[in-house]
Image: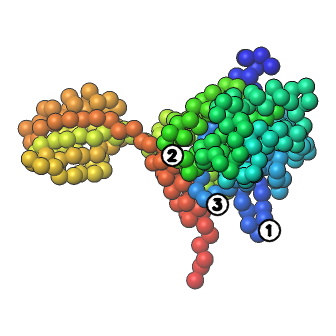
Amino acid sequence: MTSKEKETALSICVKDLTRQYGALTAINKVSFNVKFGEVVGFLGPNGAGKSTTMRILSGIMSATSGSAWVGGICAAQNPHEVKRKVGYMPENNPLPADMRVVEYLRFRARLKEVPRSKFNDCIQEVMEICDLARTARRKIIGTLSKGFRQRVGIADALLGDPEIIIMDEPTIGLDPHQIQGIRKLIDNLRGKHTVILSSHILPEIERSCDRVIIINRGRIVAAGSSLDLREEFLPGNRFSLVIEGKVSCVASCLSESGFEAIILESNRLPRNQSELILRVEKGGSNSLSLIQALSVNDNFTLHSLAPIEPTLEEIFLAATKRSWEETIENKPKISA
């Protein structure tokens, strides 16, 4: 595949994917695409359907209906071939505590049917990628730190050079230094593999991922880049400002200058100052235009103004809240 073909190729194509457990519907008509080389965050509350979706994409579980094409292969028709295309690292990966790192990776390489001619080179390569070759090659897994055990799990997922890497909570339980190490490892995979990453540590998802997909109650409720989702779920521009004087005059001052603004928060500070969180719905999207409007008023003095970028956590909460509200609105009403 040429570099241009890789840019447009879909590693994963999911259409109306549904999985039922008796009367319980774990995922319901889930649809999304992932391009080759993307790093995509897959987010959702506990029980939203993340793990079910990832198991289906990994060839471990079958869907009740719908389709999942993984690396150009239909997961329902060829689950064994899909497993060759996907390296899957589950949450709380059950590693054998009494095996040495290299022994475990050799064992896993045999299970994954890595060709004998590539066997040793493949193991050496994944250990180098995950920084295990120099420091942990002969160590017993049970003696490793949590961070290095996670690295062993990622090395396992990389065995056989799969096109797609799926990681469920790869940074859970790690300290900041260990998280930084896993982040660098994921960055090194970008462009060479397609990566789907599930995590409850939303700042890490925001730093590491090109796009995010949010699932709630078994349905996709949002998908796109952080910028796209900010515009969809948190419209308007937010600013933090500190003024001295009458807070009640800020909104009217902006209105007279052609802005539509709402004061979201107001906190009193010493020396007759107040800190405000302002959302501008219409009239300006940059700090300079606001400074100009707020600097020509006798009722207060503007001391500082700075834009506020919504975090991925705020986007996540807004998206899941909207899906809950839509569910309640669409719920059939029981007549008396």
The part of the image, by quadrant, that contains residue 80 is top right
The structure residue drawn at horizontal position 24% and vertical position 35%, both measured from the top left corner, is 305
Q: CA distance from mark 3 to mark 1?
A: 16 Å
Labels 2 and 1: the sequence-earlier one: 1
Name the residue tied to disc 3.
Answer: 47
Which amino acid type is shown beneath numbered disc 2? Asp
Name the residue tied to disc 1.
Answer: 22
Image location (x, y in percent) of residue 158: 75, 35
Q: Nearer the viewer, residue 309 or 16?
A: 309
Name the residue tied to disc 2.
Answer: 175
Estimate how packed mark 3 is, as few (under 14), some (14 to 19) or many (20 or more) residues with alpha carbons within 10 Å.
some
The kind of secondary structure element at disc 1 is: loop
Labels 3 and 2: the sequence-earlier one: 3
Quarter that holds the N terminus: top right
Labels 3 and 1: the sequence-earlier one: 1
Residue 167 position (above or below residue 286): below
Image location (x, y in percent) of residue 246: 12, 47
